[in-house]
Image (tube, rainbow, N blue to C red):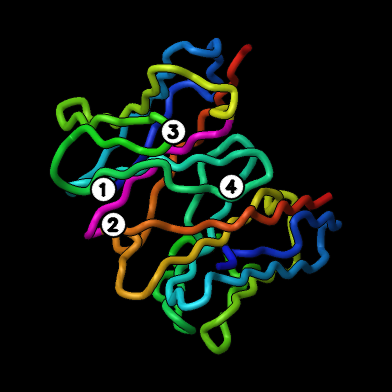
Amino acid sequence: EAGVTQFPSHSVIEKGQTVTLRCDPISGHDNLYWYRRVMGKEIKFLLHFVKESKQDESGMPNNRFLAERTGGTYSTLKVQPAELEDSGVYFCASSPPGITGATGELFFGEGSRLTVL
Amino acid sequence: AQSVTQLGSHVSVSEGALVLLRCNYSSSVPPYLFWYVQYPNQGLQLLLKYTTGATLVKGINGFEAKFEKSEPSFHLTNPSAHMSDAAEYFCAVSGIRAGNQFYFGTGTSLTVIP
C-alpha cells in the first residue's frame, strides 16, 4: 500500500513568487491534514479536510495560503505571494474515516521543504 | 488550551546506554499523548500512544513512555540505545475537545555514539 506522498520534496523560490505543494493521501483516507514546521520550532497545524470539506482551517497563517482538495482525493496548498517567513517544511498527513485525529494515528508524508529567498 | 514542551533539542547517548527524552505538556482536557519519530529522509511515524488505561505504554524498538498526570509529563525511554535509533522525536498531545488537532513539541534530535 502506498503511503502519503508529497511533491515537490524541495522548492526554492524568490519572495513574491507562487508555489503549489501537492499531497496524495493514502487511498481511502478521508481525513487530510497540513502541518508546517519552521526551522527549529514545533510542527504547527494548518488545516484539516474531511473528504473535500475544510473541517478546520484555524491554523492557516493568512490569506496568502490557499488549500484545496477537489474531489476529496489529493490536496494542494498554494502560497501566493510567498514571503521569507513562509520558509519551512510542510507536512501532509492522512487518517482513515471514522477515526478522529484525537485518538487515531496520523500517517505522514516526507514533507515538502520550502525555501523563500 | 494544549501545549507541549520538549526539554533538550539535541540529546547524545552512547550505544547501549539509556535514552531519556523529556516531554511536558499542558492540557485543559484529558489528554491523548503521542510520540512520533522521524528517521532521515522519511515522514513522521507513530512510535507509541497513550489514550486510556495503563499509564506505561510500549512502542516499537524497545521504546516506552509513562503518562504522569501529576507532573504532567510523557517522557520517552529506551533502556539500550541502538545506532538505528538516531532520529528526531516529537511529542504530541491532543484531546477530544480540541477536535482533530495535534499539538507537537519542537522535537528532540537523538544522536547515538558508537
Q: Residue at x 45, y 74 (%)?
A: A29
Q: Which residue is mark 2?
A: A103
Q: Which residues are magenta?
A: B87-97
Do discs 3 and 4 belong to a common subunit? no
Q: Is residue A52 left or right of residue B102?
A: right
The disc at residue B61 is 3
Q: Are marks 1 and 3 in contact (CB under 8 Å)?
A: no
Main SS of residues in magenta: strand
Mark 2 / mark 4, whichever is N-terminal: 4
Where does the image place residue B37, in percent across and percent down from the top left?
50, 40
Q: Position of residue A74 (x, y in %)?
A: 60, 77
Give the Cα separation between the discs numbered 4 and 1. Answer: 21 Å
Among the two numbered marks 1 and 3 on one chain, the one whose residue lies closer to the N terminus: 1
Q: CA distance from mark 2 to mark 4?
A: 22 Å
Which of the pair A53/B88 is nearer the observer? B88
Task: Kindly identify which chain the residue marked by label 2 belongs to.
Answer: A
Q: Position of residue B60 (x, y in %)?
A: 41, 38
The answer to whether mark 3 and mark 4 are in CB contact below 8 A is no
Q: Position of residue B109 (x, y in %)?
A: 56, 28
Q: CA distance from mark 3 to mark 2?
A: 22 Å
Q: Disc 3 on helix, strand or loop?
A: helix
Which residue is drawn at the image coordinates 33% and 30% (left, top)?
B64
**Is B51 placed left or right of A21 in the picture?**
left
Please name which of the two marks, 4 or 1, marks the residue nearer to the observer: 1
Q: Is residue B26 above or below residue A69?
A: above
